[in-house]
Each structure stands twice: as C-alpha cells, then as structure tokens.
Image: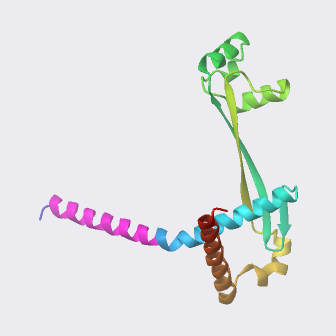
Amino acid sequence: MGFNVAERIGQLRAIEAKIKMEEEKFEEAMKRYREFAAKARHQILDYLNTTDQDSAATLQGTAYKIRSSTYSVVDRDAWRNFVIEGERWGMNSWSVAKVETEKWIVDNKQLPPGVERSAVVKLGVKAPPKSRVKKAKDEETLSEAEWAEAMKMADEMSALDAVAANSGE
C-alpha cells in the first residue's frame, strides 16, 4: 500500500483550516481578558509614574518598570564619519552598537552624530517573594466570585471607554 499524497494534502489542508478556525475563536475569547490586562498594566504604570516609584511591592506581587532603549542610524554619513574620524571601532557594525554607544553617551553627555534614541518603559509583574506567599495565599487565588467581579469590572471599563470615545473625551 503506497502513500497517497493527494489524501495527505487534503488532510493537511483540513487540519490547518481547523487550526485557523480554533485560533480565531480562541483569540476572540481572549480579547476581553487581554484588554483588561492591558488597561490594568496601563493603570499600574500610571500609578508608578504618578507616585514617582520604580516599583510597588504588595502581598499580591510586585509591579516594576522595565526600561529599554534602542538606537538607530538616522544619518548614515554622519554616523560613518563619527566612527571613522574618532576611530571608534567598537561601534563599527554600521548599525548602532548599543553598549558602546551607551558608554560614549555617558562619557560625552550627548548622542553621537547621526543617531537617535528611542526609549520604552514596560511594566513587569512578578509573584511575591516566598516569605510573603504564605500571608498572601488566600488572596493570591481569586475565587469564582472574585474572578466574575474582575471580569465585570473589565466589561464596565470597556463600556466607559466606548462612551468616552463616542463623546470625544
């Protein structure tokens, strides 16, 4: 009995269609949870910024800022001249070498010519240290009622956002 390539192709196409359909259903089901998580992250990051904190440790866990910078060449000629004239060979990838560039910025208190900096601050959240886990155990896992309340709040936040968007606020 030989391998039937046409049959296998049909099976593959059918299973890939099923995977795509299931992924779309899953993405739709997760949409409100992801929206809630994004809003909650924004609110926590806004709280940290407003209270001038880099982190907030609670019994539920710790939220902290994650800072990230990238550098990109915006003027290739200026960048090449800067590297060559200054014999800054550690920066010689013709893209911006982050570590070397950051050292140069610290030493010279300015960006190198032809370079721009983009910075992002993200929010990280981690579980509480093990020493606090015992205290927070009952609070850490949401009951069905608490989970339902959190989702109700997420739906209300979405509704309020929709009203604000429609009223031009």
Q: Quadrant of residue 149?
A: bottom right
Q: Position of residue 112 (x, y in %)?
A: 73, 23
Above or below for 167 versus 114: below
Name the one closer to the observer, 167 or 47. Answer: 167
On-image quarter of the N terminus: bottom left
Q: Residue at x 74, y 64 (%)?
A: 43
Name the one closer to the observer, 95 or 76. Answer: 76
Q: Position of residue 134 (x, y in %)?
A: 82, 79
Q: Residue at x 67, y 79 (%)?
A: 153
Q: For the view shown, which residue lies furthest in the front direction? A: 167
Q: For the view shown, which residue lies furthest in the top direction? A: 85
Can residue 165 be seen in this snapshot? yes
On-image quarter of the C terminus: bottom right
Q: Quadrant of residue 13?
A: bottom left
Above or below for 82 versus 62: above
Q: For the view shown, which residue lies furthest in the left direction? A: 1
Q: Is residue 11 magenta?
A: yes
Query: Is 37 left, or right, of 126 in this rendering?
Result: left
Above or below for 27 versus 105: below
Can residue 4 be seen in this snapshot? no
Count of marks overlaid on the render? 0
- Region of the chain picked out in magenta, as a range: 3-26
Q: Quadrant of residue 119?
A: top right
Query: Is 45 left, or right, of 4 in this rendering?
Result: right
Predominant SS of the magenta segment? helix
